[in-house]
Amino acid sequence: MLTQSLPLIHQRIDPMKRQARAFTTMLCVAMAGVQAAPLSYTSNLLPDQSTNWSNYLDLPQFDPKLGNLQSVTVELFAHLAGSAKAESHNNTAASITLSLQAQLKLANPNNPDSLLVTTTSLLQRNFIADRYDGLQDYAGSSGASFTNLVTLASHSATFLDSSTLAMFTGQGLVHAPLSATAGSSYIGPGNVRSSLLTQAGGYAIVSYEYLPTAVPEPGTLALALAGLALLGLLTGRQKKGSLPARFAE
C-alpha cells in the first residue's frame, strides 16, 4: 500500500514545485529592475542676439542615486531670426538668392576643442530682380526685402563612453560653452547691394537612459516571499512523503 501511494505523492508535489519555482523566478526577475524611461532636462535658454557670440548652457546632471547611467543624448536647438534685402544695379534681369545661416556649437567643458553637438539653422529667399529701377530702396522692380524671418533647427548626439557618462553624472550642472557663428551669404550677379542681418539663440535638452536601483514595492516583495515559502513547504512535504528503502521492497 505504501509503495503504491509513493508515486502519487510525487505526482502531486512535483508539478507544484515546478510552478512555485517558475513563479519565484519571475518575481525575482521583476525585482531585479529593468531599464527605466529616459529622463530629460532642458537647459537655460539663450535668446536671439546678433552673431557672432559665445556663451554657456547649463545642463542638469544625472543623479547617481537613481541608478546606473547607460547613455547620454544631447539635442541642440538653434533658433535663427533676421532679415535679408537686396537691390540689383544691373541693366538686365537677374536671379538673386539670399541666405541667412547660423551655426551653433556646443563644446565639451572638459575639453573645449571637442564638440558635443553642432546644429546649423538655414533660411533662404530667392527673387528675380528686373533691371535697376533707379532707386536704392530694396524694393520696386529691382529689389526685395524679407523681414521677420524665423526658423528652428536641431541636431542630437548620443554618448556611451565612460568619460562623458562620468561628466554628466552628479547633482549639479554641466556648464558647456556654446558659440554661434553666422554664415549668411548672397548668390547672384555683380552690381548688387545686399543687407543680411542674422540673430541666433539656442538651448539644449539632455536625456539620460539608465538602469534604476532595484527597490521592490511592498506588494512585490510579499509575493516573492510567498513564492519562496511555498517552494520550501513543498520541498518539506516531499521529504516527509519519501519512504525508507526497506519499505520499498
Image (cartoon, rainbow, N blue to C red):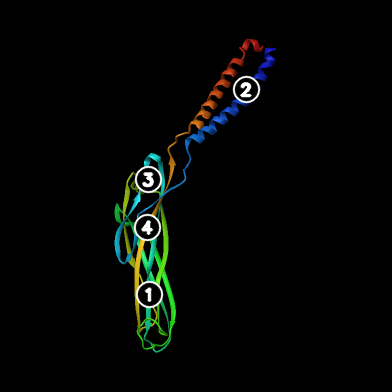
Is the residue under label 1 in contact with that under label 2 (CB below 8 Å)?
no
Q: Is residue 37 left or right of residue 176?
A: right
Residue found 65% across the figure and 19% down from its top: 9
Q: CA distance from mark 1 to mark 4?
A: 25 Å
The three-letter code of the residue at mark 4 reads Tyr
Label 3 sits on a secondary structure element that is loop
Residue 199, quarter of picture? bottom left
Determine which of the numbered discs, if any, sits on residue 62 in the image. 3
> In front: 226, or 136?
136
- Tell me the CA gap for discs 2 and 1: 84 Å
| Residue 235 tag number | none
Pinpoint residue 153: horizontal percent, then vertical percent. Answer: 42, 62
Q: Residue furthest top?
A: 246
Residue 109 location, x and y as percent? 30, 53
Tell which tag, 3 or 4, sits nearer the viewer. 4
Mark earlier in primary sequence (1, 3): 3
Q: CA distance from mark 1 to mark 3?
A: 42 Å
Where disc 4 sits, the SS reads strand
Query: Mark on residue 203?
Result: 4
Q: Which residue is mark 2?
A: 13
Closer mark to the observer between disc 2 and disc 3: 3
Q: Hey, what amino acid is under mark 3?
A: Phe
SS at mark 2?
Answer: helix
**Residue placed at 38% from the left, 56% from the top?**
204
Q: Mark 1 or 3, which is nearer the eye?
A: 1
Sooner in the amino-acid sequence: mark 1 or mark 4? 1
* Circle 1: residue type: Ala
* Quarter of the figure that contains the N terminus: top right
Q: Given contact means CB atoms under 8 Å apart, are the residues at marks 2 and 4 in contact? A: no
